[in-house]
Image (cartoon, coloured by chain):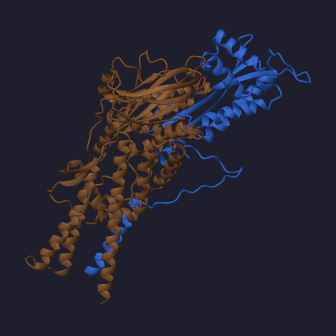
Amino acid sequence: MHFQTSKSIFCLALLIVLSGCASAHKHHLSAIAMFDRGEASAAVTELEKASKLRGGEEEIIVVDQAIAKLMAGEAKSCEQELNKVRKQIDFLRQKDVREQATAVISDDHAVAWSGREFEQRMIDNLLVLTSLVGDRQDAFAYASQGMEHASVDRQLIQSSSANASNVVTVGHVAAAQPPAVVPDRFRPNALTAYLSASVHSEIPLNANITDKAIADVQYWNSFAGDRIRQNNAGRSPIMTGFGVNSNAGHGVVHVVTLVGRATDWTAETAAPTSAALLIADQIISAVGEHTLPPTIAPVKIARPVDEQSMDPFVTSVTIAGQEASPPVFSVPLLDINQAAWDSYQADRDKQIARAVARRIVKKASVYAAKDHLSVSNDSGVDLLMNLGGIAWEAMEKPDTRHINLLPERIDVLQVELPDGVHTLNLNASLPGTAPRSATSQTTVSVENGKNTFIVCFRTGDRITSVISR
Amino acid sequence: MQKRNRSLVIALLLCTTAILSGCRGKQYAHVLSKNDEDMVGSHEAGAETWRPLIDESVARMLGRACTDVQTVSYTNEHGTPVRKVCFVGVENHSSEEVGDFNEQIYEHIDALIGQSDQFRMISRRYVEAAMVECRCRPDVLVLPEKQRQLQAALERIDQPFDYLLFAKITSGTTVSNKDYQRDYLLTLELLDIHSGESLKEQAELRKGYHKSKLAAFRQYGR
């Protein structure tokens, strides 16, 4: 009787939890659809509902909510949310014994989400950007923090390329020397350097820091590859005058376009590679006295759906009253889909290794249980235990958690304008062609030697939101 | 016996996982007292490097200022000649990012030199506003035309100057297998805009970077 009551309570609790998760997921999905349609305020409301229902991936919802708030023009609120979530992510990035142990017997979802490296860098970048379109109070600090991360990434790349070539570098190291290969997952540092250059360029005494940051944009962007260079043929370069580098009596308007939505992640059935088996062997040697079987069936891992941004459009700007003059077109600064793809490739073997190690631990546990209970091979209990083992393995899900509302690409353009108030017409168009979308107008106040930021959200050839200070 | 072995294996498994994974801890901070030593940057220069470099270079500069013949357009109430100085920033030509120390280095130098009764530093706010107005960069201020523009811009706001002060950070790296020594040099250069003569003082600090304590011991015996 007592057992039955407990069972009923357990089932009821499970039902409540599961229905809560499903409902939160539904709200999250509808918020994403609203975001795509440009209904920012409605998306914020839906995400608020989702955050009340779900506890597990709260940080993802908060970041998505912050991005939706930026789209809705609530820069200050976006900055506060991002700041809070960044601290939480810093905490969650540390390893936790309980979670690691649970992940071995369940799946990677047992480990609290703290974002992939490129997602963490994008949170840092969004903080600078929101501050620049907001009150600017902490833009300098955010930019400095971002550049510190970029510096660490550079050291990592340089040391790994030095190790790969087995050459010892002697003497003074030039700061902006491009290494042989700079992986795509570090691409968000191009935006970090761009924003840092704009922050420092307003301070004439920091001219050399500005120069260094501008050189850094090229450094991190140089690996964007031929695709961006081909696209840029005949178009404005990524960087023009910044801040006090503009003509006397002028300021610079930067239009930062957040294009579309970053790639979703899906499950991939991957055959274990030799490198993955080596890592798996290390994991299972550490957690018990198991050994790797000679053959292992493919395992499920997470993979981005798209390898790169396929959006063909650019943002174009004309000045109201000067429509006869040619528009200025945006250029891609970073492709987040490529960063995601590279991040997946860099982590692929480790993902497979974790899945293989999990499978071995699970199989070993089932066999150990059978041995312990002395279950004979042809018995019904044996069949049941085998089925249980299969179900246990089948319950595993690849870790496809990601920030849903990050853009797939970030495009930038700069317009140098005289000191004063100006109205800008923003359109989406194919490079070098006439506008395809309805014109979005925004008014900005340009100050002598200063940078003014406009954040533009664009989905395909439709501008969904324009935020300016 | 078998049961005991299994328990042992489980205990070992848990311990290994704990050691390999570590624990998630909250960050901790504390206030340093005056007697506490500065933390030593393990990968790049920090307070332990910049503070002594600033103190030494400024002290040398002030020492030289007492003895050298000087061009001034202003004396204080005791008849002491006072150099009016426009400090145009810290240039980083080292192989390291200076990061947020850049602003601190400027402020420290500005404040320390400003404390001397032989120098009058023009407020950074005036300097920046004038540089924005004439679109001057520190590195082009040696050009007479740019100098005149800056001078004119500062004179318009009643802040004339006799000297330009440049601060420059450089580094030199010597690599020995996986260890390296980096020499940091902070140079202060006081440029007389009337005569074109410059007064230069510098301070140096050397730091050894090692992959392990043992490597440091092998190199320096400590």
Chain in brown colour:
A
Q: Position of residue A384 (x, y in %)?
A: 15, 75
Image point (77%, 18%), residue name:
B160
Image point (34%, 52%), residue name:
A30
Q: Is residue A117 above or below residue A437?
A: below
User: For the N terminus of chain A, which image quadrant?
Assistant: bottom left
Q: In this image, B3 relative to B106: left or right?
A: left
User: For the C terminus of chain A, which image quadrant?
Assistant: top right
State the hue of chain B: blue
Q: Position of residue A428 (x, y in %)?
A: 36, 29
In this view, the residue in front, A55 or A41, is A41
Q: How many marks?
A: 0
Image point (50%, 29%), residue name:
A213
Q: Is residue A309 above or below residue B15?
A: above
Residue furthest out toward the right: B78
Q: Is residue B18 visible?
A: no
Q: Is residue A239 visible?
A: yes
Q: Position of residue B90 (x, y in %)?
A: 62, 27
In this view, the residue in front, B72 or A15, is A15
In this view, the residue in front, A33 or B123, is A33
Q: Position of residue B122 (x, y in %)?
A: 75, 25
